[in-house]
Amino acid sequence: MRRYFILVDVLLLLAFFSSAPWSAKASSHCKQTNSGKIRPHSVTITEFGAVGDGVTLNTKAFQNAIFYLNSFSDKGGAKLFVPTGRWLTGSFDLVSHLTLWLDKDAVILGSTNSDDWPVVDSLPSYGQGRELPGGRHRSLIYGQNLTDVVITGDNGTIDGQGSIWWNWFRSKTLDYTRPHLVELMNSTGVVISNLTFLNSPFWTIHPVYCSHVIIQNVTILAPLDSPNTDGIDPDSSDAVCIENCYISTGDDLISIKSGWDEYGVSFGRPSRNITIHMLTGHNINGSGIAIGSEMSGGVSEVHAENLYFFNSSTAIMIKTASGRGGYVRNIYISNVTLSNVETALRFYSNFSEHPDDYYDRKALPVIERITVKDVTGANIKVAGLLEGIEGDSFLNVCLLNVTLEVTSESPWTCSYVQGYSDSVSPEPCKALKKIPEDVSDCYSLSNYLWCLRTQKRNSWLHSW
């Protein structure tokens, strides 16, 4: 019954989303995907002995099928078809020039035996597992050093059956960090589309050290109280496009990352050129879009537009801390609709988790040129909690055309931030001055601000 109501909610929200003002004229912001490309070779998982009864473990069947299909990687690639059924499996690797295709009623189920999720080394930009020292369990669907990989289908489902992992996490009985549902490393030309992802043990989709990634037309669901079940986490990756997704999880819907403290600084691979378009979702413990808190390699050139968040804790958040180093700059967020959200915009500068005691406490993050534009919200508790770091103010925060119906008597709290605002209601902090003298101070708003200044100057001349 609970699943029925969740699906009804999803359908209602997608109906809202399709009728939103931008949807009628919107076209894809992602370049044409190759999710439908024809591979010259194709096999079905049943040809390798798989049984779709939800009980038989099919790890060997997936591994053997993909090993066989790897022989076609230099012959135009291959497709692994997963038909209707419930296909239980442990972790398996993908290969280059491969399409993993799930039929409409196909469900890949993650094993509930931790031995079926091998332990691998920690990421070099993190220095250890994100939750525990040492290694980490490998994701259910995994790949590294790949080119031209497609995970798609006719809205089939990948279910991590994460509840057992959440219980182990809460009881503190894990020896290693929990696995993601999908993780691709050091890969390029990745497409993930037209699928539903359920109940990830940890973060759901994690492209790390990747380039040219498209995540499109996916639904990601996990219980609202499930721990750290982020939806999509681009990590030290560039040229990532996320479009037309519905996400409801126990943590951030999207969180952009780039490594943790001294390990992220040393590894030095930023996340940049990230596009997010037409995202709908909610949670009670995270954010709609977050940057950080692991951002030590830097995050820049993020464009997020046409967003709808409801019944959520926070809409937009930048998370960082002294010791992180790195930077967050050139962020543009626009066309945002909020309903029943506790905090619309938050900068949290005291995210105190560190991998070890060797981080540089004097490594301060640089946060600058953050633009938030065209936001409306109803039943918002707090408009903004903008907390920079003493001696390290967050600069050139620009808010334009923001209208929020706020229930708190103190809608804005600001410390160690500087910036500008225009047409913001309720009235923002004094630290956010009216119009910048130099229009380039506000990221991606030079033309807008030039026109605004010209309009105001002409208005003054007419009144004079």
Image: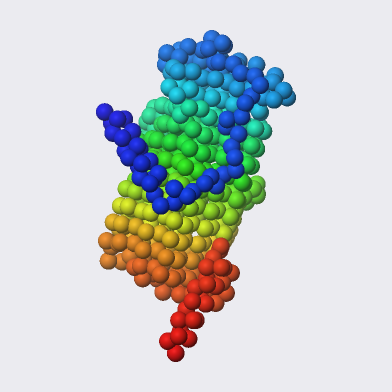
Residue 53 placement (x, y as % from top left): 42, 13
Residue sitting nearer the eye, 172 or 339? 339
Q: Can residue 435 be seen in this view?
A: yes
Residue 154 relative to residue 214: left or right:
left
Q: In this view, does 17 lie above or below 385?
A: above
Whether 198 is drawn above or below 393: the answer is above
Q: Is residue 285 visible?
A: no
| Placement of the C terminus among the 4 image quadrants | bottom left
Q: Quadrant of the N terminus?
A: top left
Image point (45%, 32%), residue name: 197
Residue 104, located in which quarter of the rendered image? top left
Residue shown at the point (57%, 74%) measured from the top left = 438
Query: Can you name the residue that lies furthest to the bottom here?
Result: 464
Observer-nearest of 186 and 242: 242
Q: Position of residue 57 (x, y in %)?
A: 48, 15
Is 329 in front, or is 125? 329
Query: As drawn, which residue projects farthest toward the right?
Result: 74
Tell which residue pokes out farthest to the front in this image. Answer: 24
Tell me what residue is drawn at x 45 percent, y 59 percent.
347
Left or right position of 221 against 330: left
The location of residue 186, given as percent across then percent down, is: 65, 37
Query: What residue appears at the point 64 percent right and 48 percent down from the top-left corner?
Result: 269
Identify the colour scheme used.
rainbow
Location of residue 14 by image quarter: top left
Residue 395: x and y in percent read 53, 67
Residue 405 appears in which quarter of the rendering? Answer: bottom left
* Label tally: 0
Q: Nearer the viewer, residue 464 or 377?
A: 464
Q: In the image, is residue 455 above or below residue 389? A: below
